[in-house]
Amino acid sequence: MVGNKQNIDIGPCRVKFGTAGAEVDLGYTLGGVKVSISTETKDIEVDQELDPVDTIITKRTVTVEVPLAEFTIDSIKAAIPGVEVVTDGTDPAKKKLLLKSNGGSMVSMLSFAQSLILHPTDRADTDKAEDFTFPNAAPNGSIDITYDKENPKVINATFRCFPDASGVTAIFGDSTATA
């Protein structure tokens, strides 16, 4: 097999998050968006064989790390599940974000899951051949923000991705393709 240098891909992506079909662009990122897929396995062993006779997949975890470079209420809202944005009743330019305690009750991350799409910036909006779509992605809510004199504030949002009703956790390529 001879390699094809045109298959080597470098470049950033746009990140969209929200209700499927109406996702909102989260703006600039800084430091690269990272997709991680981790698969855990278990060897199946029997007394009669020295080597495992099979290996089964026991768990698959998919996460997407998005370093949001635009320091806004909307960016923080995208990174933390369950926050509330309040818009002033007389001046719509005035907003605040409320991070509330859940009062000790457990909340399902899946209840915050929405569609997350990574679209390469070097492709036209209609060209979805290299899109990475996560139908059920929820921000994990852990962020660190550093205030210093030399670097922009970056909101490092990490999304945990869950399978949808049909068992699909991620789609690479044009999600509208059918068999």
Image: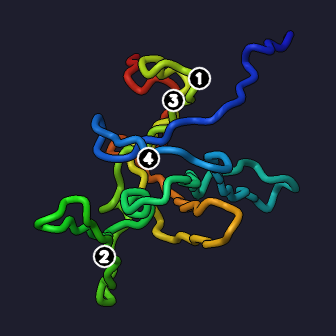
Question: Which residue matches tag 1?
Answer: 122
- Mark whose residue sits in front, 1 or 3: 1
Tag 4, which secondary structure?
loop
Residue at the far left in the pictured view: 90
Image point (27%, 69%), residue name: 84
Q: Amino acid at mark 1?
A: Asp
**In the rendering, at what x and y percent does residue 170 appear?**
49, 40
| Badge 2 or badge 4: first in the primary sequence | 4
Q: CA distance from mark 4 to mark 3?
A: 16 Å
Give the quadrant of the C terminus: top left
Q: Residues within 10 Å of mark 3 (few under 14, many from 20)?
A: some
Q: CA distance from mark 1 to mark 4?
A: 17 Å
Question: Which residue matches tag 2?
Answer: 98
Q: Residues within 10 Å of mark 2 (few under 14, many from 20)?
A: few
- Mark whose residue sits in front, 4 or 3: 4
| Badge 4 or badge 3: first in the primary sequence | 4
Q: Amino acid at mark 4?
A: Leu
- Tell me if 56 is positioned left or right of 63 in this view: right
Q: CA distance from mark 1 to mark 3?
A: 11 Å
Question: Which residue matches tag 4?
Answer: 26
**Is 3 drawn above or below residue 46 in the view shown?**
above
Q: CA distance from mark 2 to mark 1?
A: 36 Å
**In the rendering, at what x and y percent does residue 32 appear?**
66, 46
Question: Which residue matches tag 3?
Answer: 131
